[in-house]
Image (tube, grey):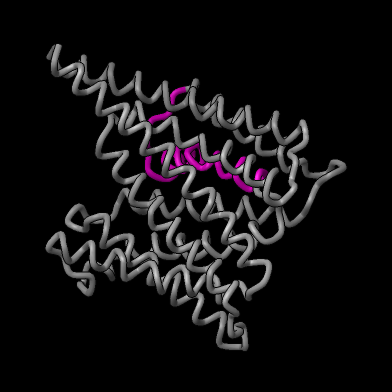
Amino acid sequence: MDQGADQARSNLRGIILMLAAMALFAVEDMFLKWAAADLPVGMVIFVAGAFGAPVFAVMARMGGQRVLTRAALNPWVILRNLGEMAGTYAYIHALALVPLSTVSAVLQAMPLAVTLGAALFLGETVGWRRWAAIAVGFAGVLVVIRPGLEGFRPEATWVLVTVAALALRDLATRAVPKECNTAQVSCWGLMSVGLLGAVLMVPGGAVVPDSGQIGVLFGALVFGTAGYWAVVAASRTGEVSIVSPFRYARLLFAILIGAFIFDEIPDALTLIGAVLIIGSGLYALARERARKRALSLQGSSV
């Protein structure tokens, strides 16, 4: 009884931490949207990488790991970094050009994109129910973006590029050597992002920010770093299958921020598409949980 109560309390703490993480990430997006509207994209990307990487370098050192190692040149690490760079580049453009609720709604399809990629490229077994969930989820993406219909915004394709690139990043992460810890991998990814930003600034893509712009960039860094800490803590505190569904709360926070800060009210099609994406994602997550439980019971009975 005590063990069950302890697990329930851990799950509750994990849920609270996950909700906090999603709120922090939504606020980070608010600051990034402000920054991308006033500053060159390369400069925003450089600041995100160059100032975020040292945080994880310190975390790696605290865990007894060095950042500058041969493992950083592992092909899977490099592929992951490329996905991180492309995803960040596309995401900053999306935030600058597309309503926050639209960006966040389409971004919720990322777990489905990862599942699709794992099935197509890593040989992971996906049953027909999860295939159906993937189809419904991507139908929801089309409803949100509505290509060929009135209200279609071509710049919304930046969000699709973001989803594809970050799915590549997450798929490559699965193949990164186990001896590389989370802080090292995160640091390498952010170093790559900083390098991309520096390259983009070479042809004159940099300005001297004023005090307000410095405050916006600082806000993005603080809330982004805090969000990363909270999501890692949530995953380590509660059961992943219990805590993970609360990642979708990010869309709710994004809608609220979009409405009250940017005066962006999502229309009916955006909300319908979001429901399809989140519903299919939750169903796929439940099917995956049931599959793992069945395999565990099968293994224990052997």
Tell me which residue sits at (53%, 69%) in the image.
Answer: 215
Q: Position of residue 143 (x, y in %)?
A: 72, 35
Q: What is the chief secondary structure element of the magenta stretch?
A: helix
Tell me which residue sits at (70%, 32%) in the image.
Answer: 271
Q: Position of residue 189 (x, y in %)?
A: 38, 64
Vertical side of 72 occupied by 285: above or below = above
Tell me which residue sits at (22%, 74%) in the image.
Answer: 68
Q: Quadrant of the C terminus?
A: top left
Say which quarter of the image contains residue 63: bottom left
Tell me which residue sits at (84%, 44%) in the image.
Answer: 151
Report if residue 185 lies within the magenta region: no
Vertical side of 214 occupied by 231: above or below = above
Q: Is residue 56 left or right of residue 198?
A: left
Q: Is residue 235 left or right of residue 127?
A: left
Looking at this view, is 221 or 113 the one in front?
221
Vertical side of 163 occupied by 70: above or below = below
Q: Quadrant of the N terminus?
A: top left
Looking at this view, is 71 or 98 the one in front?
98
Say which quarter of the image contains residue 154: bottom right
Numbered range of the magenta stretch: 101-127
Looking at this view, is 87 or 260 the one in front?
260
Q: Is residue 192 left or right of residue 37?
A: left
Vertical side of 156 occupied by 254: above or below = above
Q: Position of residue 53 (x, y in %)?
A: 35, 69
Say which quarter of the image contains residue 255: top right
